[in-house]
Image (tube, rainbow, N blue to C red):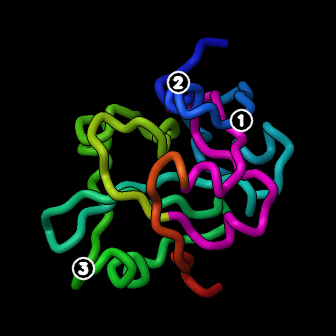
Amino acid sequence: MKKTNAARVLDRMKIAYELGEYAFDEEHLGAEHVAAEIGLPLDQVFKTLVARGDGREVVMACVPGSGDLDLKALAALAGFKKVEMVPLKEVQPLTGYIRGGVSPLAPKKAYRLFIDASALSFPFISVSAGQRGLQIKVAPGDLVAATGALVGSLVKDR
């Protein structure tokens, strides 16, 4: 299993984590598939989404696989009037990551990161290690420390 830039960031910061491989295919890149493959509840597998605030600044948000990003909540937390999801074709040029492999760690450019507060209720969460088929399990507080993320409520009420 090769180390990704995301894992190297944690290594440099001496943050404990666990890398885990799983089987993936192009048809099933969602958090539901990842959670089933790695044997974790969907609430504990976080997906990293890329958005743009007020038509300019790119930001990233980590939310549980079981939830949908609340764009209004993200806008409020980030200090924007409004936030829109970045079109899929822009994700790789902006982050260096492809869909199904977007990590909150080590994107091509340092974007502000926002993590849903539910992460803090777990001893560890799982996020993409920066490539499809590879996840990082890390303590949420360590992920916040490593990324400088802001934590808040980011999931739409069900």
Q: Mark 2 and mark 1 in contact? Answer it, CB < 8 Å.
A: no
Label 1 crowd bin: few (<14), some (14–19), many (20+), radius 10 Å = few
The numbered mark, 2 or 1, whose residue comes first in the sequence reads: 2
* Local secondary structure at mark 2: helix
Residue bearing mark 3: 80
Q: Is residue 36 magenta?
A: no
Q: Is residue 112 left or right of residue 147?
A: left
Please identify the residue farthest to the top as the structure is shown: 2
Label 3 crowd bin: few (<14), some (14–19), many (20+), radius 10 Å = some
Residue 26 image position (x, y, % from top left): 54, 32
The numbered mark, 1 or 3, whose residue comes first in the sequence reads: 1
Can residue 40 be spotted in the picture? yes
Residue bearing mark 1: 16
Residue at left offset 76%, top offset 51%: 124
- What amino acid is labelled 1 in the image? Ala
- What amino acid is labelled 3 in the image? Phe
Q: Nearer the viewer, residue 78 or 131?
A: 78
Q: Is residue 146 left or right of residue 33?
A: left
Residue at left offset 28%, top offset 80%: 79
* Local secondary structure at mark 3: loop
The numbered mark, 3 or 2, whose residue comes first in the sequence reads: 2
Asked if 125 appears above or below 8 in the picture, the reply is below
Asked if 88 appears above or below 75 in the picture, the reply is above
Residue bearing mark 2: 8
- The region drawn magenta spans 115-144
Inter-mark Cα distance, 3 to 2: 32 Å
Residue at left offset 30%, top offset 45%: 110
